[in-house]
Amino acid sequence: MHACGHDGHMSVGLGVAYVLAQLKQSISGNIKVIFQPAEEGLGGALAMIEDGVLENPKVDVILGLHIWPELDSGTVGVRPGTIMAAADKFEITLYGSGGHGGQPHLAIDPITLSAEVIEGLQTIVSREVAPTEPVVISIGSVHGGTAFNIIPNQVELTGTIRTADEAVRERVLKRIEEKVQAIVKGNNASCDIHFKRCFYQTFNDDSLVEEFRSTVIDSWGAETLVDLKAPTMTGEDFSEYQRVIPGLYVFVGTRSEAKGLTFPIHHEKYSIDEDVLDFGVEVMVKATLNLLKKGGR
């Protein structure tokens, strides 16, 4: 079970380090290969930055890669500007008043309240945000109740908010707070709402994108390059590095219908086309060496 494919990323990183080590006599400049833990919302990138990973020697630009099952194996995708969304986690606890399943009029049912809240959250996306502004609100878990004939005291909801623009993000967070509080008040209940920022937008430097596009086209041909039309609404803490220095994040395709490798990331059956790992190494090595030749930019 490969989850998000980070084992593949580590394999590519090791391959890049091995190849560059063989070429070190011909390399003018410094290269760091980062093997970062705790990417999935746990603050791994920020912790490494705080520990000085971008210093001694100072790092001028940073490159990152994600294997990507939405692109065909042997292709590579990139776009200028936002390539991955910002992500926030939310936790909502709805407090009602428990009771007997046969006497709902004597209770305040947090389960029916949770259904109203879930529907209300989705109307923020469909009725309060312009269709040209990407926003995704997803409920990842709903927990409440202990028995089939008991109305519980509380229900807990968790989920994520994904946005491609910071102003839209702030507006959506505000509306979630307002809407949930209004629904809860209308049902004579109460709630706790907590937000946690997981990732900023992953934002590609325009000049690095152009350099990378040229590298891919010159090395493998234009048919290998996929110019992504819109950001993906998944998130990535590579964005923390990009808040400090210019950065480039790209997708290497791993989709192969012939091999049955069509499941998305985070699916229990997602698997990696391992033949692509060597290609990923080539992509990163060539992009790195070409940037060094141009003085880092």
Image (cartoon, grey):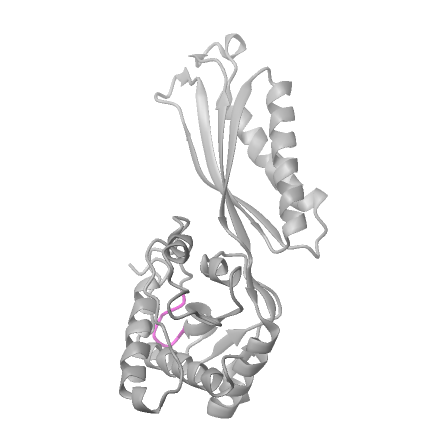
- Left or right: 212 in relation to 142: right
Residue 89 higher or lower than 245, as above or below: above
- Using residue 154 as the reference point, say whether residue 189 is left or right of it: right
Which residue is more in the foreground, 224 or 196? Answer: 196
Can residue 23 be seen by looking at this rendering?
Answer: no
From this viewpoint, is residue 172 visible?
yes
Q: Is residue 150 left or right of residue 186?
A: left
Predominant SS of the magenta segment: loop
Q: Residue at x 51, y 18 (%)?
A: 109
Determine the image quadrant of residue 145. top left
Residue 121 in the image: x percent, y percent? 60, 37
Q: Where is the C terminus found, in terms of image quarters?
A: bottom right
Q: Residue furthest top?
A: 106
Residue extending furthest toward the front? 56
Residue 232 vs 143, above or below: the answer is below
In percent of the image, x 56 and y 76: which residue is there? 209
Q: Quadrant of the N terminus?
A: bottom left
In-front residue for pair 21/132: 21
| Magenta span | 255-262
Residue drawn at point x = 38 percent, y = 48 percent: 42
> Where does residue 285 sit, x and y in percent of width and height?
39, 82
Residue 161 percent coordinates (x, y): 55, 46
Q: Hey, which quadrant is residue 82 in on the image?
A: bottom right
